[in-house]
Amino acid sequence: MKRLLVLALLIFCVLISRAQAQNGQSVKPDAVFLGNSITQNWSNFHPDFFKLNNYVGKGVGGEVTSQMLTRFRKDVLELQPCVVVILAGTNDIAQNQGYVTHRQIMDNIASMADLARFHNIRVILCSVLPAGTYRWRSEEFNLEVLPSQAIQQLNEMIRQYALENNYEFVDFWTPMSDEKGAMKEGLSSDGVHPYPDAYFIMEELVTPVISRLCGQ
């Protein structure tokens, strides 16, 4: 009799564990943050910001927008978040994968946004962070204007696209840029990647937008 009771208890515990695991897997994130090393560092520096708010960080260092578009289904659509936060474009301007036009960058960002909308995921498009130079691209490369100017041009395209298509636009560039369009002193060690504390600026801007879109 005791053996039967022990066996029944074990079976019950296994079933409960499985149910809990399944429930954990079925919880949809409020937001997926898609980006490059800036987003990757964000989730590494501030893990509690993501965990406590039910956010997921999907940043891959060095990626350009075409690579993010390739993994968009796996890293965003399959997770079915309420919101996707897209922070992308600086590595395209740095020509990490070769020269691309602003139009090509914008087309990739637009494709990600429109895919999200088609799958009932709300969209936040973020401005590219300011940068005056790319230290890892010190060799000569084909850039028609300075990085700071190229970033401002792309940001205006992103802002306009968001406005025309009823997407949210979050402007990180303005509070983080200096008078020359580079990253403000004290916010970054290399002028591109924010220090851990600099992410608090970004969090204060994007969190209320996510909450509003998710009806919180």
Image (cartoon, rainbow, N blue to C red):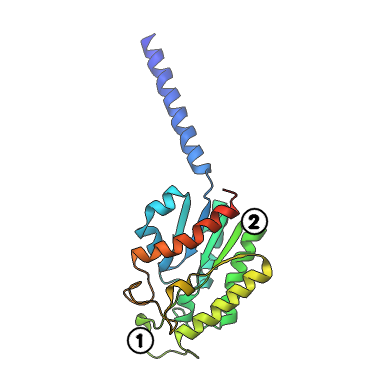
Q: Can residue 40 be seen in the rendering of this structure? A: no
Residue contact at pointers 2 and 1, CB within 8 angstroms = no
Label 1 sits on a secondary structure element that is loop
Q: Earlier in the sequence, mark 2 or mark 1?
A: 2
Residue most extreme to the top: 1
Q: Secondary structure at mark 2?
A: loop
Question: On the rendered image, what quadrant is the N terminus found in?
Answer: top left
| Residue 45 vs residue 136, the one in the foreground | 45
- Does residue 16 sit above or below 87 in this rendering? above
In x, y percent, where is residue 71? Answer: 52, 63
The percent coordinates of residue 188 (x first, y second) are 34, 73
> In the image, 8: left or right of 117?
left
Residue drawn at the location 52% of the way across and 50% of the way down: 29
Instruction: Identify the residue shown where x is 56% and y is 81%.
Output: 102
Residue 172 location (% of width, % of height): 48, 70
Task: Give left or right: position of 93 versus 168.
Answer: left
Horizontally, residue 137 falls left or right of residue 216, namely left
User: What residue sits right under mark 1 in the picture?
Assistant: 138
Q: Residues within 10 Å of mark 1 (few under 14, many from 20)?
A: few
Q: Amino acid at mark 2?
A: His
The quadrant where residue 10 appears: top left
Marks 2 and 1, how far apart in space?
A: 41 Å
Q: Which residue is found at the position 58% from the left and 72% from the top?
A: 108
Q: Is residue 69 above or below residue 183?
A: above
Amino acid carrying label 1: it is: Ser
In the rendered image, residue 152, in percent from the top left (x then y), is placed at: 52, 81
Location of residue 68 with respect to 98 vertically, above or below: above
| Residue position for label 2 | 119
Q: How many marks?
A: 2
Residue 192 bears which disc, if any?
none
10 Å crowding of disc 2: few (<14), some (14-19), many (20+): few
